[in-house]
Image (spheres, rainbow, N blue to C red):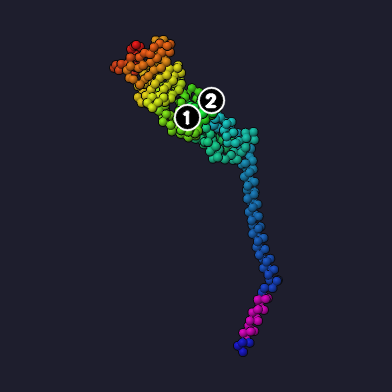
Amino acid sequence: MKRKTTNRRNTHRNVLEVRVMSPRIAWLGLLGFLGGLTKIACVLAVLAGIGWGVWRGVQHAFYQNPDFSLKVIDLNANPVIDEFGVAEAIGIDLASCPSLFKIDVAQAAGKLKNMPGILDARVERHLPGSLVVRIIPRTAKAWISCPAQGISEVRRAGAVLVDQQGVAYSCPGLQVASAVTLPVIELTSDEPITTGEKIEHAELKHCFLLLDSARAADPDALQWIESLRQVNEWSLELLTRGGTRATFGLGDHPRQIESLRAALDHASGEGYAIDTINLIPKYNIPITLRDGSPPRAILVKPPASGGTRRERDLGTLLDRN
């Protein structure tokens, strides 16, 4: 009896399973699944439509709105770049008057910072139609000449300038006019000079110290200094625009600059021209004259008390033996 009952129960279970898995029920299940997908698709379509509408609205309100087209590039005064140069550097077609919202201001600032002669840059949108550009130009200190590395041309666009921090960069075309009177620093080192990077040559540091001393003593020093170079391990040479070659030590520059200025003033007043002068000695300064006269010495005595330092220095040039 038990065995027969078990067989009947198994047979009944199989019949139920067959009925549950019939094609009609499977089809209905598939239709229900597809209906769910259709509902999801409809929701997604509605969301996509809303997104498309919002995007088109933004396009119409901002990107395609002529009120927000670029009308002005507001650039601060500087000796490096003008408004047309900014547009070219950023990649703006001024003829098409692009929307301000199509200009990536962060990317634009990055492009300007990578340009020679620009230390830092900031770009902002000012609605409705202004692109405000503020740059900090590099302040040129001197031209660099280094024939050993093929750097020989100066005072022209593309020549190498060095700024106040000692960074070398190619002179932009607009900066030539303001930098043309700067002195030339002649380097002989084989260490590479790379534009955009700081020059670490010891020669440059020594010449900078002398140039700084000259400018501290005379704000117009750049008008009469033609070039500077390190001659050897213990001396520098300064060439004036008048053709005088002055020898300096690596230190004690303020005293030597004052002696040079006093000697040049004395020579001008007496009507002779100094060809060379060695300023390392303190009291007997050897000179040679440009007219071919034999070498002489300017006898200098310690400054007396009274009067200004400039007056005392001029008074110490007592004789040319």
Amino acid beneath label 2: Arg
Task: Name the side, left or right, on which 295 lies relative to 38.
Answer: left
Residue 13 covered by magenta stretch: yes
Q: Residues within 10 Å of mark 1 (few under 14, many from 20)?
A: many
Residue at the image point whose x is 65% and y is 76% from the top = 17
Cα separation, mark 1 vs mark 2, equals: 14 Å
- Give the image location of residue 11, x and y in percent: 65, 81
Query: Which residue was labeled with disc 1?
Result: 162
Camera-side residue of 97 and 86:
86
Q: Residue furthest top?
A: 271
CB contact under 8 Å: marks 1 and 2: no
- Give the image location of residue 99, x and y in percent: 61, 38
Compared with residue 92, is residue 18 higher up or lower down, i.e. above or below?
below
Query: Which residue was labeled with disc 2?
Result: 156
Residue 58 covered by magenta stretch: no
Q: Quadrant of the C terminus?
A: top left
Residue at the image point whose x is 35% and y is 11% from the top = 320
Q: Residue furthest left?
A: 305
Q: What is the quadrant of residue 220 in the picture?
A: top left
- Where does the magenta region start and end? 5-19
Is residue 123 visible to us here?
Answer: no
Q: Which element is circle 1 on? A: strand
Task: Name the side, left or right, on which 74 lies relative to 238.
Answer: right
